[in-house]
Each structure stands twice: as C-alpha cells, then as structure tokens.
Image (cartoon, helix red, strand yellow):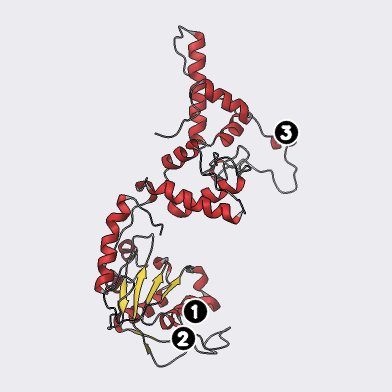
Amino acid sequence: MGDGAGQPVRRAKPGISRRGREGEPCGAAQPARAGDRRARHRQGTDRRAPPSPVFALVRPIGHDELRGASGNLIEAELFGHEAGSFTGAAKTRHGRFEEADGGTLFLDELATLSSPAQDRLLRAVEYGEVTRIGASRPISVDVRIVAATNEHLPRLVEQGRFRADLLDRLSFEVVTLPPLRARQGDIPLLAEHFGRRMAVELDWTNWPGFGPDALKSLEHYSWPGNVRELRNVIERAVYRHEDPERPVDQIQFDPFASPWAPPRSADAPHLPPVGMSPDPAAEEPQPQAAPMPEAEEVDDFRTAVTAFERRILEDALARNRYNQKATASALGLSYDQLRHALKRHELLNAAPG
C-alpha cells in the first residue's frame, strides 16, 4: 500500500484512525480481531498499554505451492508447528499469531490463503485460539488482524474460493484505497521518493530530480500496476540514467517494448517441422510498410504529406507509450532523427491527453 498526500488517500485515513482509537481492527482491506481483550495500538487511547509490536506476513503463498509435502507451509508460518509434525519440521516453531500476541498481525494477499488456512484463521478470529500443527491443545492469543487484498472477496465467496463466514468476521471495517491513477498529486511525491532511494543505492552524490518531460509522462500514464509498477519504472529509469548531474529525462514504461519482441501467441508465425531448417530469409526482420492513407482529393501535396507524417508519428508514439527511444526503434529511425521529426511537427512534448 503506497501512502500519499492526495485527497483520495486523506479521505480514507480518518476511518483507519478512528478504528485505531477505538481499539477495533483497521486496514487497507478486510480487517478483524482475534481474541476478546482489546489492546490499544499506535493510535490508541490506552496509555497504560505498552507499545504493541507489528508483525507482517509479506510473502503470499499460492494454491499450487500448498499441495503435497509443501501444503503446511502457510499454516506453519501463521500458526506454528510441533517438531516432527510434517517432513522438514525438525523443531518446534512459534507461528506469527503467537509472535504477535498483544499486537497487530498484517496479512498481505489475503485472497491467496488455502481452504485449510482459512479454516484455521476463522477459529483464530472467532475464538482467539490457535493450534500449532501437530499439537492437541490450542493456545490463546490476543491479536488484531489487518489484511489487504487486491481481489473482490465477495466475488470469491460467490465462486466458492473464500469462506463466507470468515469474510463476515473479517469485514468489520473495510477501507478501499483508490488506485494510483486517481491520486495524481501522489505520483510526483512517490517518484521523488523512489528516485532518491535508488540514487543512494547507486552511490550518487547528488539527486538531480526528474526533467519536465519525464514528470509529464509519469502524470499522464494510467499505472495499471499502481505503486509497485511506479517503483519499478522509477528504479529502472534512474539505473539507466548515465549522467547524475542532469535530471532524469527518459522514462520507459514497458521494458519489453521492442520492434524485435517475440510475436504474441495469436500472431505467432508457422514453424517448420522438426528437423527442417527454416528459411534463412524468414529470420531476417522485415520492415513493416506503413498503411497507405485513404484515397482522397489532395489540393496541396506538401500539406497532405506533412499531415500524413504527423499522423504516423502520433500513432507510433501512442503505441510505444510515448517512449521516444522505443518509438525511434519501431520506426527504424535513430533517436536524433526521431527528435528532429518530432520537433518539426511540434510533438516533442507529446503525451496522452
């Protein structure tokens, strides 16, 4: 979850803060509390209670990893196990619930929990008890649960992939955070944060910031991957930037964008039978002819050619997400040739509207 200063996030924070003061669960998605006692946490009002620890389970384990001998991994992580309870359990281990007793446990990617793990989680939430794998006696715990997911859990309940009774217990307070594209004011702040951190990792003595063109492209991008995608894009841009004294001005949103990228499965070429050599000429990349404009009456040849060239540039920029290096490669131009053409058509600062 990426924090920020934008209005959408600020509107979501009061609900979280209110639940913190009341000692109730709060979080980015479906939160709940295991146990009857209610310890006050960082925003709580009970000054007698000691500061509560926060433990995070940050790595989700998918359903495929929970089969066979590895089926106890997530349950062992959350609830602990006794020595010899399954292959590889050489000694007794306390689970995250026991470690977070009296504090808060953050469960990321809640929707990836297996059915057995959901059963155990329901018991922990309902009765405030957890039982280690291989043990016969439950252990009482007092843990507030904060959970996050990018799935719509009611839909998973309808599909039979998530327990309805567990969702009822976990949904005491639900906070839906807005996507990054709805938090325009947060994009430059987060970009600056990730950029500075990457510059430190690269041992730069100075952080030059981002150029105006780079900032404009960041603000106009839709960010389907939200903050994680923003972080990757920024770290890649800083890593590839060669002059730490100049602002970062090149942003590549799609690292796979290339005129030589393998075709998609639907467009894959027919491969020759095994044992036969492909046609050598077919291995050479063939330039793609630009589509011909529709026949129309032309009164001014120069104006028509200029308009057609501009349309080619605009379409190529859009296909390559306004990355000029990728656009130049796609059009078979050098970077300087493309920049000259964009300047001639006043498209240097072109960005999606």
Among the 4 quarters of the image, the one containing residue 247: top right
Per the image, the residue denoted by label 2 is 133
Circles 2 and 3: CB atoms closer than 8 Å: no
Q: What residue type is labelled 3?
A: Ala
SS type, badge 2: loop
Q: Which amino acid does label 1 sit on?
A: Asn
SS type, badge 1: helix
Q: Which of 231 and 137 is in front in this view?
A: 231
Tell me: residue 83, above or below residue 215.
Answer: below
Count residues near mark 3 (Cα–Cα under 10 Å), then give few for <14, some for 14-19, many for 20+.
Answer: few
Q: Which of 277 and 302 is in front in this view?
A: 302
Horizontal side of 75 relative to 22 (left or right) equals: right
Circles 2 and 1: CB atoms closer than 8 Å: yes
Residue 114 pos. (x, y %): 43, 72
Among the 4 quarters of the image, the one containing residue 174: bottom left
Tell me the mark number nearer the camera, choosing from 3 and 1.
1
Tell me: residue 59, above or below residue 334.
Answer: below
In this view, the residue farthest toward the bottom is 136
Residue 176 pos. (x, y %): 31, 58
Circles 3 and 1: CB atoms closer than 8 Å: no
Tell me: residue 142, above or below residue 149.
Answer: below
Quarter of the figure with the C terminus: top left
Q: Which residue is drawn at 71% across and 49% down?
A: 274
- Mark 2–mark 1 distance (CA, rounded to whole Å): 8 Å
Count residues near mark 2 (Cα–Cα under 10 Å), then give few for <14, some for 14-19, many for 20+.
Answer: many
Among the 4 quarters of the image, the one containing residue 33: bottom left
What number is the disc on residue 281? 3
Q: Which residue is drawn at 28% across and 80% down?
A: 38
Residue 222 pos. (x, y %): 41, 44
Per the image, the residue denoted by label 1 is 72
Q: Which amino acid does label 2 sit on?
A: Ile
Residue 139 pos. (x, y %): 38, 89
